[in-house]
Image (cartoon, grey):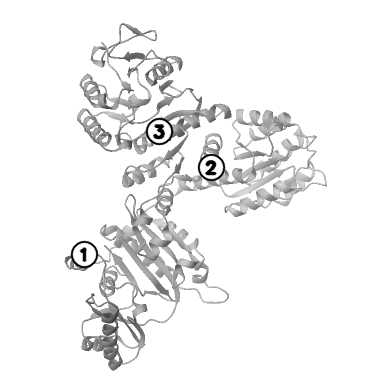
């Protein structure tokens, strides 16, 4: 773990490229450090310095500074950067913020300069943030080592961003919204210090309660997962990820890849390590504000208190839509509510206190609702009626909330009418929203995180030991030795067999006699199909024949298939014909894997068969660290799971066999990084057991 103390809490800072000319970045950084109240020493560095700069003693070089320097903020032309970094290294400066642009982002010579910068960082054991970044702000140190024109309000939210422009916009927005930050960190090109390093540091920062981030890429997938699993047990991490994974582009040859799309890898990875993923900037800061102000709920049951029936219905609809629950109130609670709510209102959830509700009615209602054991959270939804008293209602809500440790969100559907109330609520640590949908989504994030904190995600794959890794390795090596990057069906069956994956037996026949003998030994009926990694659409050329019921028919069919293949693809020499045991029909599922270049195997499960791409009933989970609970959730989140459990009087299928197959496929793909794609479609699932029919493995 990097020690980033000097980046955020330095005792002395050198501004290399400091300037007395307004508008220059070197001027803005120096002025920001002076104005923010930084308590340490500030050393302006400029080769033309002559005694003093902006009222501070100035130096021509860091070497001329008499004392130690904890942090150097550099804003000089890119071509001078590395020579100056060498000088900083010799001075013993361990922390650098490289604001200057003109490196990897422009390619060519810039990329070469950045490679040299990385080497200098290693040589002197430096922490280099950037280059091409805005800088850093710490409101508690305080320190504004950036060229942002404003210092945000002090708070408990940390924001980490790969985009400097996004960082400036967020700081500007936060000022108008009254939102406070503990730290704001612009990462830039991440030549050395990455989002992983910063988030790892923030995990132990007592001034930070929630970590938000805007990322365009992940530096190191494996380390990201390992670090985030630890950090998210301490405090929530909410990230928005722009762009898309390379996995989709690399996986178009399989059903699994086509179904996954470009972004499934990040969804699966974030879920695996407990990171909350925001899909919009609105969500990012709604979640962040909710986490920064609210306790975590103990469960999913929500009470809605409203002065408008329509708003209550909207809120209830969204609660159900996101998988939370509208709490069922006890008779005792409803009897108490009848004493404070007029008969025209409603004491059932959503609770309607009516449009003329006084501040006392709100407070009394909330006292009763928050005391109900079977309620985990409360959402208040208000519209600005003529008799509504915003400030007084806000104060009543605060009084009620002070008596409870349950999350309470307020939705004030309106604008200027609610300004006073919203200020009262926010000043007292209560999150406010304009629309019910955003409040419910934020509450869902809190509920999800409360579950994440309690999860003990032990990998279930490690418990599988009855596999023959050497046998599987031999099959893969043989295929590679023959210059093939895709296994034949018979080879894929051998790999599956080595890992205990139940599959329909299949063997390769190179002549009609072998085909006949294999079919007879297997037991009829059988399927014959052309064996070649060069022929993709086998059925279209007559390369697949089913329901073969005798040895003679198998021999004749072998010759017909080989002839059809030669006619359709005269330039291809097939490996032979594969003979496979025909299995009885069962429920058809798909189990697959695509390997993400950052996060490793992404395991897919869903409805299989010929309509797999049309129906698109599939769920993806990260193979690394997968647990029994995650596999249960993966299966339950698909429509096919309802068929497997028994639908309309059908006997249930063997879901335990499906789970076992998922675990074994995961273990196989974790054991062999050279497996790029794996696609089993269909797998027939029976009342007892299951059988994989068509297994594709690509290296």
Q: CA distance from mark 2 to mark 1?
A: 46 Å
Judge whether 574 appears above or below 246 on screen.
below
Where 141 falls versus 522 (above or below)?
A: above
Query: Can residue 376 be seen in this snapshot?
Result: no
Residue in the foreground of this view, choosing between 79 and 229: 79
The extreme top residue here reads: 51
Residue at (32, 27) in percent of width and height: 98
Of residues 73 and 274, the one drawn nearer to the viewer in this rendering: 73
Query: Label 1 belongs to which residue?
Result: 473
Q: Is residue 519 visible?
A: yes
Q: How many marks?
A: 3
For residue 132, what is the image quadrant? top left
Helix, strand or loop status at disc 3: helix
> Residue 268 placed where, x, y %?
42, 53
Q: Are marks 3 and 2 in contact (CB under 8 Å)?
A: no
Give percent across and percent down for residue 62: 26, 16
Mark 1 burial class by Cα count in 10 Å: few <14, some 14-19, many 20+: some
**Earlier-in-chain disc, 2 versus 1:** 2
User: Which-is-in-front pick, marks 3 and 2?
Assistant: 2
Where residue 202 is drawn, which disc sits there? 3
Q: Can you identify the residue that label 2 sits on?
A: 283
Question: How far apart are the two marked residues, 1 and 3, measured between alpha carbons?
Answer: 43 Å
Residue sitting at 57 percent across and 46 percent down? 441
Q: Could you say whether the residue bearing mark 1 is in a helix, strand or loop?
A: helix
């Amino acid at each position: 773990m990097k020690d980033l103390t000097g980046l955020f809490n330095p005792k002395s800072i050198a501004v290399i490229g400091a300037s007395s000319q307004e508008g220059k970045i070197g001027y803005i950084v120096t002025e920001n450090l002076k104005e923010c109240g930084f308590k340490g020493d500030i050393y302006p560095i400029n080769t033309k310095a002559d005694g003093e700069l902006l009222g501070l003693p100035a130096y021509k070089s860091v070497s001329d500074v008499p004392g130690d320097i904890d942090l150097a903020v550099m804003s000089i032309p890119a071509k001078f950067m590395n020579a100056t970094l060498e000088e900083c290294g010799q001075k013993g400066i361990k922390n650098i913020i490289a604001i200057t642009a003109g490196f990897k982002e422009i390619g060519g010579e810039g990329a070469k300069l950045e490679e040299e910068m990385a080497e200098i960082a290693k040589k002197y054991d430096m922490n280099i943030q950037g280059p091409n970044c805005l800088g850093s702000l710490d409101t508690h140190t305080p320190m504004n080592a950036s060229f942002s024109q404003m210092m945000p309000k002090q708070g408990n939210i940390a924001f980490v961003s790969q985009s400097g422009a996004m960082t400036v916009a967020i700081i500007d927005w936060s000022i108008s919204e009254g939102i406070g930050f503990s730290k704001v960190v612009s990462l830039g090109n991440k030549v050395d210090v990455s989002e992983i390093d910063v988030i790892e540091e923030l995990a132990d920062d007592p001034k930070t309660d929630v970590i938000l981030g805007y990322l365009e890429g992940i530096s190191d997938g494996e380390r990201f997962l390992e670090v985030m699993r630890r950090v998210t047990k301490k405090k929530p991490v909410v990230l928005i990820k722009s762009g898309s994974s390379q996995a989709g582009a690399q996986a178009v040859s399989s059903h699994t890849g086509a179904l996954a799309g470009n972004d499934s890898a990040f969804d699966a990875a974030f879920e695996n390590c407990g990171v909350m993923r925001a899909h919009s900037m609105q969500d990012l800061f709604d979640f962040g504000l909710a986490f920064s102000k609210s306790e975590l709920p103990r469960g999913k049951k929500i009470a809605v208190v409203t002065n408008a029936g329509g708003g209550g219905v909207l809120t209830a609809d969204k609660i159900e839509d996101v998988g939370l629950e509208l709490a069922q109130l006890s008779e005792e609670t409803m009897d108490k509510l009848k004493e404070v709510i007029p008969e025209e209102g409603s004491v059932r959830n959503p609770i309607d206190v009516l449009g003329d509700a006084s501040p006392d009615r709100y407070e009394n209602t909330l006292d009763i609702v928050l005391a109900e054991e079977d309620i985990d959270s409360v959402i208040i939804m208000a519209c600005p009626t003529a008799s509504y008293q915003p400030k007084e209602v806000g104060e009543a809500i605060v009084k009620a909330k002070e008596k409870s440790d349950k999350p309470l969100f307020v939705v004030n559907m309106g604008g200027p009418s609610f300004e006073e109330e919203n200020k009262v609520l926010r000043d007292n640590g209560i999150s406010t929203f304009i629309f019910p949908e955003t409040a419910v989504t934020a509450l869902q994030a809190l509920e999800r995180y409360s579950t994440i904190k309690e999860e003990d995600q032990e990998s279930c794959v490690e418990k599988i030991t009855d596999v023959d890794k050497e046998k599987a390795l031999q099959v893969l090596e043989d295929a590679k030795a023959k210059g093939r990057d895709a296994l034949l069906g018979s080879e894929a069956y051998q790999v599956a067999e080595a890992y205990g994956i139940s599959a329909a037996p299949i063997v390769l026949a190179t002549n009609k006699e072998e085909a006949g003998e294999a079919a007879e030994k297997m037991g009829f009926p059988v399927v014959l199909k052309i064996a070649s990694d060069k022929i993709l659409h086998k059925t279209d050329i007559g390369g697949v024949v089913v329901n073969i019921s005798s040895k003679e028919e198998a021999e004749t069919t072998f010759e017909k298939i080989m002839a059809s293949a030669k006619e359709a693809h005269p330039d291809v020499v097939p490996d032979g014909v594969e003979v496979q045991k025909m299995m009885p029909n069962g429920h058809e599922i798909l189990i697959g894997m695509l390997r993400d270049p950052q996060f490793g195997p992404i395991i897919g499960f869903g409805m299989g068969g010929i309509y797999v791409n049309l129906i698109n009933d599939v769920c993806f989970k990260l193979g690394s660290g997968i647990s029994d609970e995650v596999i249960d959730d993966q299966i339950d989140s698909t429509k096919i799971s309802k068929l497997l459990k028994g639908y309309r009087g059908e006997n249930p299928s063997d879901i335990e066999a499906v789970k076992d197959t998922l675990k074994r496929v995961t273990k196989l793909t974790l054991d062999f990084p050279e497996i790029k794609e794996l696609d089993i479609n269909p797998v027939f699932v029976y009342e007892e057991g299951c059988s994989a029919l068509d297994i594709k493995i690509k290296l």
